Image (cartoon, grey):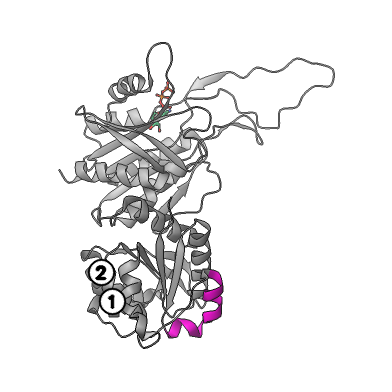
Amino acid sequence: MEQKRIVVGVAGGIAAFKACTVVRQLKEAGHSVRVVPTESALKFIGAATFEALSGQPVHTGVFENVDEVPHVRIGQQADLVVVAPATADLMARAAAGRADDLLTGTLLTARCPVLFAPAMHTEMWLHPATTDNVATLRRRGNVVLEPASGRLTGADTGPGRLPEAEEITTLAGLLLERGDALPYDMAGVKVLVTAGGTREPLDPVRFIGNRSSGKQGYAVARVMAQRGADVTLIAGNTSGLADPAGVEVVHIGSAAQLGAAVTKLAPEAQVLVMAAAVADFRPAQVATAKIKKRVDDDSAPSVELVRNDDVLAGAVRARADGQLPNMKVIVGFAAETGDANGDVLFHARSKLKRKGCDMLVVNAVGEGKAFEVDHNDGWMLSADGTETALEHGSKTLMASRIVDAIGALVHR
Ligand code: CTP
């Protein structure tokens, strides 16, 4: 991505130290970063730290370098403003349209996407004053992240933790790629996402697995949650991905466990996104003790496989039988290669028909494509015959386009 001008606003909270990692990651992605802390942020982290990390001067007030009119210029020139952490006080001032320091002045003059990453105690986050301010900021097109749940400053826990720096910079990258704000259009929608690969056990230490990294499904869960959905993620094996903020994660191992989790949770859901790479077969027998090679015998054992249930097709059937009255949209994923019978889209069209889902997201796979990489492209095929190409971009950008399409189906 070309170099962008990013303003990182830092408000005065204990999580201000995490802003250092945010600045570093955005710099490493090749962007120009200007840090604008509040006076209180500097009680936690010194200006010298932010100056050294960003390579740019750090000011907090509107009466420094007045000849350059920084409270107007910094906002006008920004491609993105990220406020991390955004305290209750900072969001109250931003919602009220105050301009009593350089950061709030910058927020008033910025015309680019603005991302707030809140961090505060649970009571402050849940207070109606904060809820109203967050709603006001969202209504104006700002993105206000869901805070993570977990340990806060003291011994207490609850929603209010600053999401990990990686989560913040991933969503910052998404806003730059999209070039527009992320709509807050899935509030109250219950979404079930499966992601990652299943592991079919052979014995207590071995399994048959696959190369799915889980990145695409995690990105869908992350973007859904940040657009307001109530998301449960059924996670198989992934490449060590962190739980997305604001998402309930259920970890599973085998295809049978994934199927059981979907059966249990699907009746509540309005949207099911089957991004998991579910094994079609499992070993017929699972040895209770580790399978040993024999010293006196060179022969290799053979493994008999049996079919696993098709979870996606099962959900489509259950809905047709009236067992999933809330379910509005079922999305399948397919990783395809072309062969002598037809190209990727030919196979995808027949898979969409066979599975009977509302939408199929298709990737072409092969060396260096789709699996384990961060960038991807593909198509979305809908049951009504619409075919939309997904532009090449990060898996988070693809997820946001997929959620755009799901949103249109949910709200039709
Ligand atoms: N899927 C599923 N249960 C399975 C296998 C696949 O729910 N036992 C889902 C996947 O999560 C995905 C979709 O079905 O959303 C397509 O997966 P894919 O492996 O491409 O489909 P298959 O029917 O297994 O087709 P193929 O014969 O091409 O492997």
Q: Could you tell whether 133 is left or right of 284 in the image?
A: left
Q: Amino acid at mark 1?
A: Ala
> Which residue ends up furthest to the top in the rendered image?
340
In magenta stretch: residue 44: yes
Marks 2,1: beta carbons within 8 A: yes
The magenta stretch is 39-53
Q: Amino acid at mark 2?
A: Leu
Q: Is residue 262 visible in the rendered structure shown here?
A: yes
In magenta stretch: residue 261: no
- Count neighbours of disc 2 (C-alpha within 10 A) and say few if under 14, some if 14 to 19, many if 20 or more: many
> Which residue ends up furthest to the bottom in the rendered image?
63
- Residue name at image x 72 percent, y 17 percent: 300
**Mark on residue 137?**
2
Quadrant in the picture for the C terminus: top left
Q: Could you tell whether 235 is left or right of 290 in the image?
A: left
Secondary element under disc 2, as helix, strand or loop, is helix
Image x and y of residue 335, in percent: 42, 29
In the picture of the structure, the residue carrying the numbered disc 1 is 94
Does label 2 or label 1 sit earlier along the sequence?
1
- Examine the residues drawn in magenta and state their main secondary structure: helix
Image x and y of residue 302, in percent: 65, 17
Quadrant containing ligand 1 reads top left
Image x and y of residue 267, in percent: 29, 42
- Residue name at image x 33 percent, y 67 percent: 77
